[in-house]
Amino acid sequence: MSDEQVAAPTNRRRISQRGIATRDRILEAANRLMLVRGVNATTLDDIREASQTSKSQLYHHFADKQELVRALVRYRGALVLQRERAGLERLRSFSGLVRWRNALVQANSLNNGKYGCGLGSMALELSDQDEQARSSLSETFAAWEKLISDGLHRMQDSGLLRQDADPEKLATGLMAALQGGYLLANASHNVAPMEVALDMALEHIKSFLAQPSGEPTR
């Protein structure tokens, strides 16, 4: 996916449409490889081979691996937020949360729970190595969490969620359950722990519904 604004070079140099396509190809290859292998285990030569680019092409767009990784953090963050907006921007019911949960679990089950969350895995590797990358990841997680809390606020405004509920805290709890679920699913290569973590978080939110509907979380 091309996202010129989010994935623009750090030095803001102007590049041609052909150059943009090459840059996106490099980022797409890096995204695939680093999701499976991790950031530290993926070399620039690996990315160059996978993207079918020369050394001169790669270094024209990225001075070094750190610059490429920082661009990938923004690139991957844009992809995740685009996906999450589709499921959360119109969220206004508990059943909407269940559908969101089901979509994430189904997507992760395609890999038998492997690889985890693309953002979470990068946060584990980079947070103590690169402050700029850590800050960018933190901002993306905050935007993701806000999509959830905004939906909970809409539920509260419409009377579906009790007034004593705290949408921000509930959103943080749900995000923590999601990321923990991704981690456990990756460790076991089984999506079941992710299902349990999300279902328990949703049951907690359900306890704040003004009129619990009794609908299951599966």
Image (cartoon, helix red, strand yellow):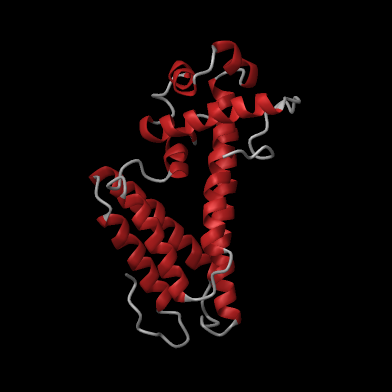
In this picture, residue 199 sits left or right of residue 209: left
Q: Considering the image in quadrants, where does the N terminus appear?
A: top right
Indicate the position of residue 112 as horizontal and vertical percent values: 27, 47
For image coordinates 32% across by 56% down, the residue present is 194
Please provide percent x and percent y for residue 32. 43, 33
Q: Quadrant of the C terminus?
A: bottom left
Q: Residue furthest bottom?
A: 211
2 up-or-down from 180: above or below: above
Q: Residue at x 44, y 88 (%)?
A: 211
The quarter of the displayed image where residue 121 is located = top left
- Left or right of 122, for residue 7: right
Occupied quadrant, residue 36 = top left
Disc tally is 0
Q: Residue 83 placed where, x, y %?
A: 52, 53
Q: Is residue 131 visible?
A: no
Q: Residue at x 30, y 51 (%)?
A: 109
**Apparent side of residue 20 relative to residue 77 in the rendered image (left or right):** right
The residue sitting at 44% across, 63% down in the picture is 100
